[in-house]
Image (cartoon, rainbow, N blue to C red):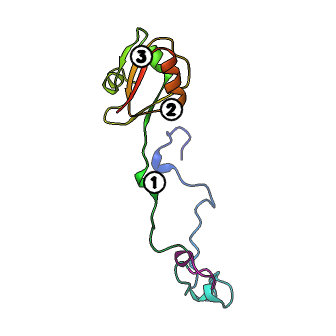
Amino acid sequence: MAENTPLRIHHLRPAPGANKSKIRKGRGEASKGKTAGRGTKGTTARNKVPLGFEGGQVPLQRRLPKYKGFSNALFKTTYQVVNLDKLGELFPEGGDVTVEALVAKGAVRKNQLVKVLGTGDISVALNVQAHAFSASAKEKIAAAGGSVSEL
């Protein structure tokens, strides 16, 4: 190329030795032939290893149980939990606390069971209606002058 001509894309070439040709194994003894990188004799040399074969050990798909079995996890009851300190923040003036009121204030999701837990303290009298209560929550609500009713 002349010194004053600009470099063009079609002038670019890979560096010498960068592009090496692929080794064609198993194409005659003069060019990586014979065993073709598989070693001498043995199962892998003959390419007959079944999928999941573990050398004669009982394979994983036979060690594991065939059917899933039974679990009580499907019948577990899950609750949306609300703590007493959260109730004190949401209802500072006291009054009636229902599941619908908690959903409206964004404390729980709708169409879910609600459980009131006793974390924190409460100073106002609340009439709480929920699906479940912890023992400490019942005591603290009663001590503050409120009432508890389970749905």
User: Image quarter for residue 131?
Assistant: top left
Judge whether 23 appears above or below 98 on screen: below
**Residue 17 part of the magenta segment:** no
The residue lying at 48 percent from left, 20 percent from top is 141
Relative image position of residue 99 (x, y in whole percent) = 34, 27
Instruction: Identify the residue position indicated by label 3 in the image.
Output: 126
Instruction: Identify the residue position indicated by label 2 in the image.
Output: 134
Relative image position of residue 116 (x, y in whole percent) = 46, 29
Which is closer to the viewer, label 2 or label 1? 2
Instruction: Identify the residue position indicated by label 1 in the image.
Output: 73
Residue lying furthest bottom in this view?
A: 41
Q: Nearer the viewer, residue 29 or 114?
A: 114
Mark seen at residue 122: none
User: Image quarter for residue 109?
Assistant: top left
Q: How many marks?
A: 3
Callouts 2 and 1 close, C-beta under 8 Å: no
User: Image quarter for residue 74?
Assistant: bottom left
Left or right of residue 31: residue 132 = left
**Residue 116 at least partly seen:** yes
Q: Residues within 10 Å of mark 3 (few under 14, many from 20)?
A: many
Secondary structure mainly formed by the magenta segment: loop
The residue lying at 50 percent from left, 14 percent from top is 144
The residue lying at 46 percent from left, 50 percent from top is 10
Magenta residues span 53-63
Amino acid type of the residue that numbered disc 1 sits on in the rendered structure = Ala
Amino acid type of the residue that numbered disc 2 sits on in the rendered structure = Ser
